[in-house]
Amino acid sequence: MTTYRFNPVLAALAALLLAGTAHAQSAGTLTGRLAVTRIAPDVTSGDLTAPSFAGTQADVTANTQPTGGLTWMLNDNIAVDLPLSVGFKHDLVGAGAIAGVGKIGEVKALPISLLFQYRFMEPSAQFRPYLGAGPTYAKFYKARSTAALTSLTGGTPSNPTTLTIDSKLCLTVQAGVSFSVAPGWSVDVSVLKTALKTTAHLSTGQTMDVTLNPTVYTVGVGYQF
């Protein structure tokens, strides 16, 4: 005859599984998350204004950083989401006629977004896809040039070329899914696309228009309060 012994750990796990999504994403709940986010610009560069080589352009590299966020359920299906980050660092590299010069600068970017989401399925559903949209203020700061940019634009070590990039208000759209893994806990995956055009200004008086249109990928773990 086989004797079964009570295991409190297994019992607790079973209780979690049976509870499913009892603490669901319903009206009035607040979910905080910790995540990893990658911003990958889809760059279309204009030419640097005269005087410059014809076709002098730039590309912008991707960057990945730890992020966070808060999601407030206004009702059982509509939520307001506030992504949180401390900023992303992007390298500016030569493109077009100067594709071989390498890094010409760097800039920090802080996307400040407020997204309104519609979450499908019932609040108690384990799998809840959603769509979102809202404004993003793309703040660019701490832009720095390199010796390569100074050389290309006629500057000198004692009088280097400096640059700034315009911050812009733009629109972001989002698609994602939240998957409940235990009462109060969820895994969230989303993809965002932002329509973003900006202008770089050099201390020489030259400018460059750049379409960035970044795609943003986020994977995070959330806890519901």
Image: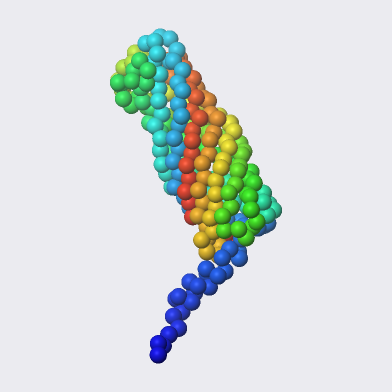
Q: How many marks?
A: 0
Which residue occupies the extreme front position in the image?
A: 1
**Relative to residue 162, is residue 169 drawn left or right?**
right
Residue located 44% across and 80% down the image: 7
Q: Residue at (31%, 17%) from the top-left corner?
A: 151
Task: From this view, report whether residue 198 is shown above or below residue 15.
Answer: above
Task: From the top left corner, tell me how far across and down residue 186 is, in percent.
Answer: 52, 57
Where, quadrant-wise, is the N terminus in this rendering?
bottom left
* Residue at x-position 56% and y-position 55%: 127
Question: On the picture, is 52 further left or further right than 167?
Answer: left
Task: Please name the colour scheme applied to the rendered image.
Answer: rainbow
Q: Residue at x 33, y 26 (%)?
A: 103
- Location of residue 6 (image quadrant): bottom left
The C terminus sits in image quarter: bottom right
Q: Position of residue 80 (x, y in %)?
A: 63, 47
Quarter of the image where one finds residue 146: top left
Looking at the picture, tell me which residue is in the foreground, 105 or 95: 95
Of all residues shown, which one is farthest toward the right?
75
Along the line of sight, which residue is nearer the eye, 82 or 17? 17
Where in the figure is residue 101, as x and y percent of width and height? 30, 21
Residue 171 position in % (x across, y down): 59, 33
Q: Is residue 154 visible?
A: yes
The residue lying furthest to the bottom in this view is 1
Residue 160 shows in this picture: no
